[in-house]
Image: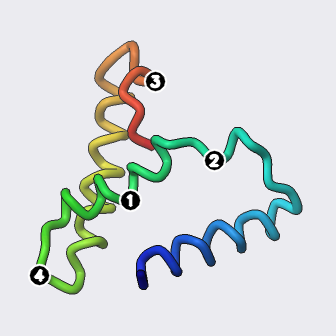
Amino acid sequence: MISGTFCSVARMLAAVNQQAAYPGQFDWPQSGDAVLVLVNGGMYVFLAPVVGAIVYRIGHDLIVRVTIHGQLARLG
């Protein structure tokens, strides 16, 4: 419940910052990114989401640089 609250507040602030909310922004892979970050980081450690986000970002950058079809690997 706490996680959902923070996600809602973050999306609301993003819509206020962009001064609009378009249907294309509500895309299911984006909501899966948070789950992937948490799985990468692990459980039972407070800074695990931070480690997961770093691993996720580095993995995305490597896939885009190494492959010619980097957009097919939808990570972020």
Image coordinates for residue 24, horizontal then vertical, percent: 70, 39
Return the disc, 4 or 1, that comes first in the chain's sequence: 1
Image coordinates for residue 27, horizontal then vertical, percent: 57, 42
Q: Residue furthest front?
A: 1
Q: Residue furthest top?
A: 68
Q: Amino acid at mark 3?
A: Gln
**Alpha-carbon span between mark 3 and mark 1:** 19 Å
Q: Secondary structure at mark 4?
A: loop
- Splitting the image into 4 quarters, where does residue 60 fall? top left
Left or right: residue 7 compared with residue 55: right
Image coordinates for residue 68, horizontal then vertical, percent: 38, 13
Label 4 sits on residue = 44
Label 3 sits on residue = 71
Q: Nearer the viewer, mark 2 or mark 3?
A: 2
Label 1 sits on residue = 34
Mark 1 surroundings: few (<14), some (14-19) or many (≥20) residues within 10 A: some
Q: Nearer the viewer, mark 3 or mark 4?
A: 4
Label 2 sits on residue = 26
Q: Secondary structure at mark 3?
A: helix
**Alpha-carbon span between mark 2 and mark 4:** 30 Å
Q: Amino acid at mark 1?
A: Ala
Q: Residue at x 63, y 47 (%)?
A: 26
Q: Is residue 22 above or below residue 14?
A: above
Contact between marks 3 and 1 (CB within 8 A): the answer is no
**Alpha-carbon span between mark 2 and mark 1:** 14 Å
Nearest the viewer among 49 and 27 is 27
**Alpha-carbon span between mark 3 and mark 4:** 33 Å
Q: Residue at x 59, y 72 (%)?
A: 8
Q: Split into 4 quadrants, where in the image is the N terminus?
A: bottom left
Q: Amino acid at mark 2?
A: Phe
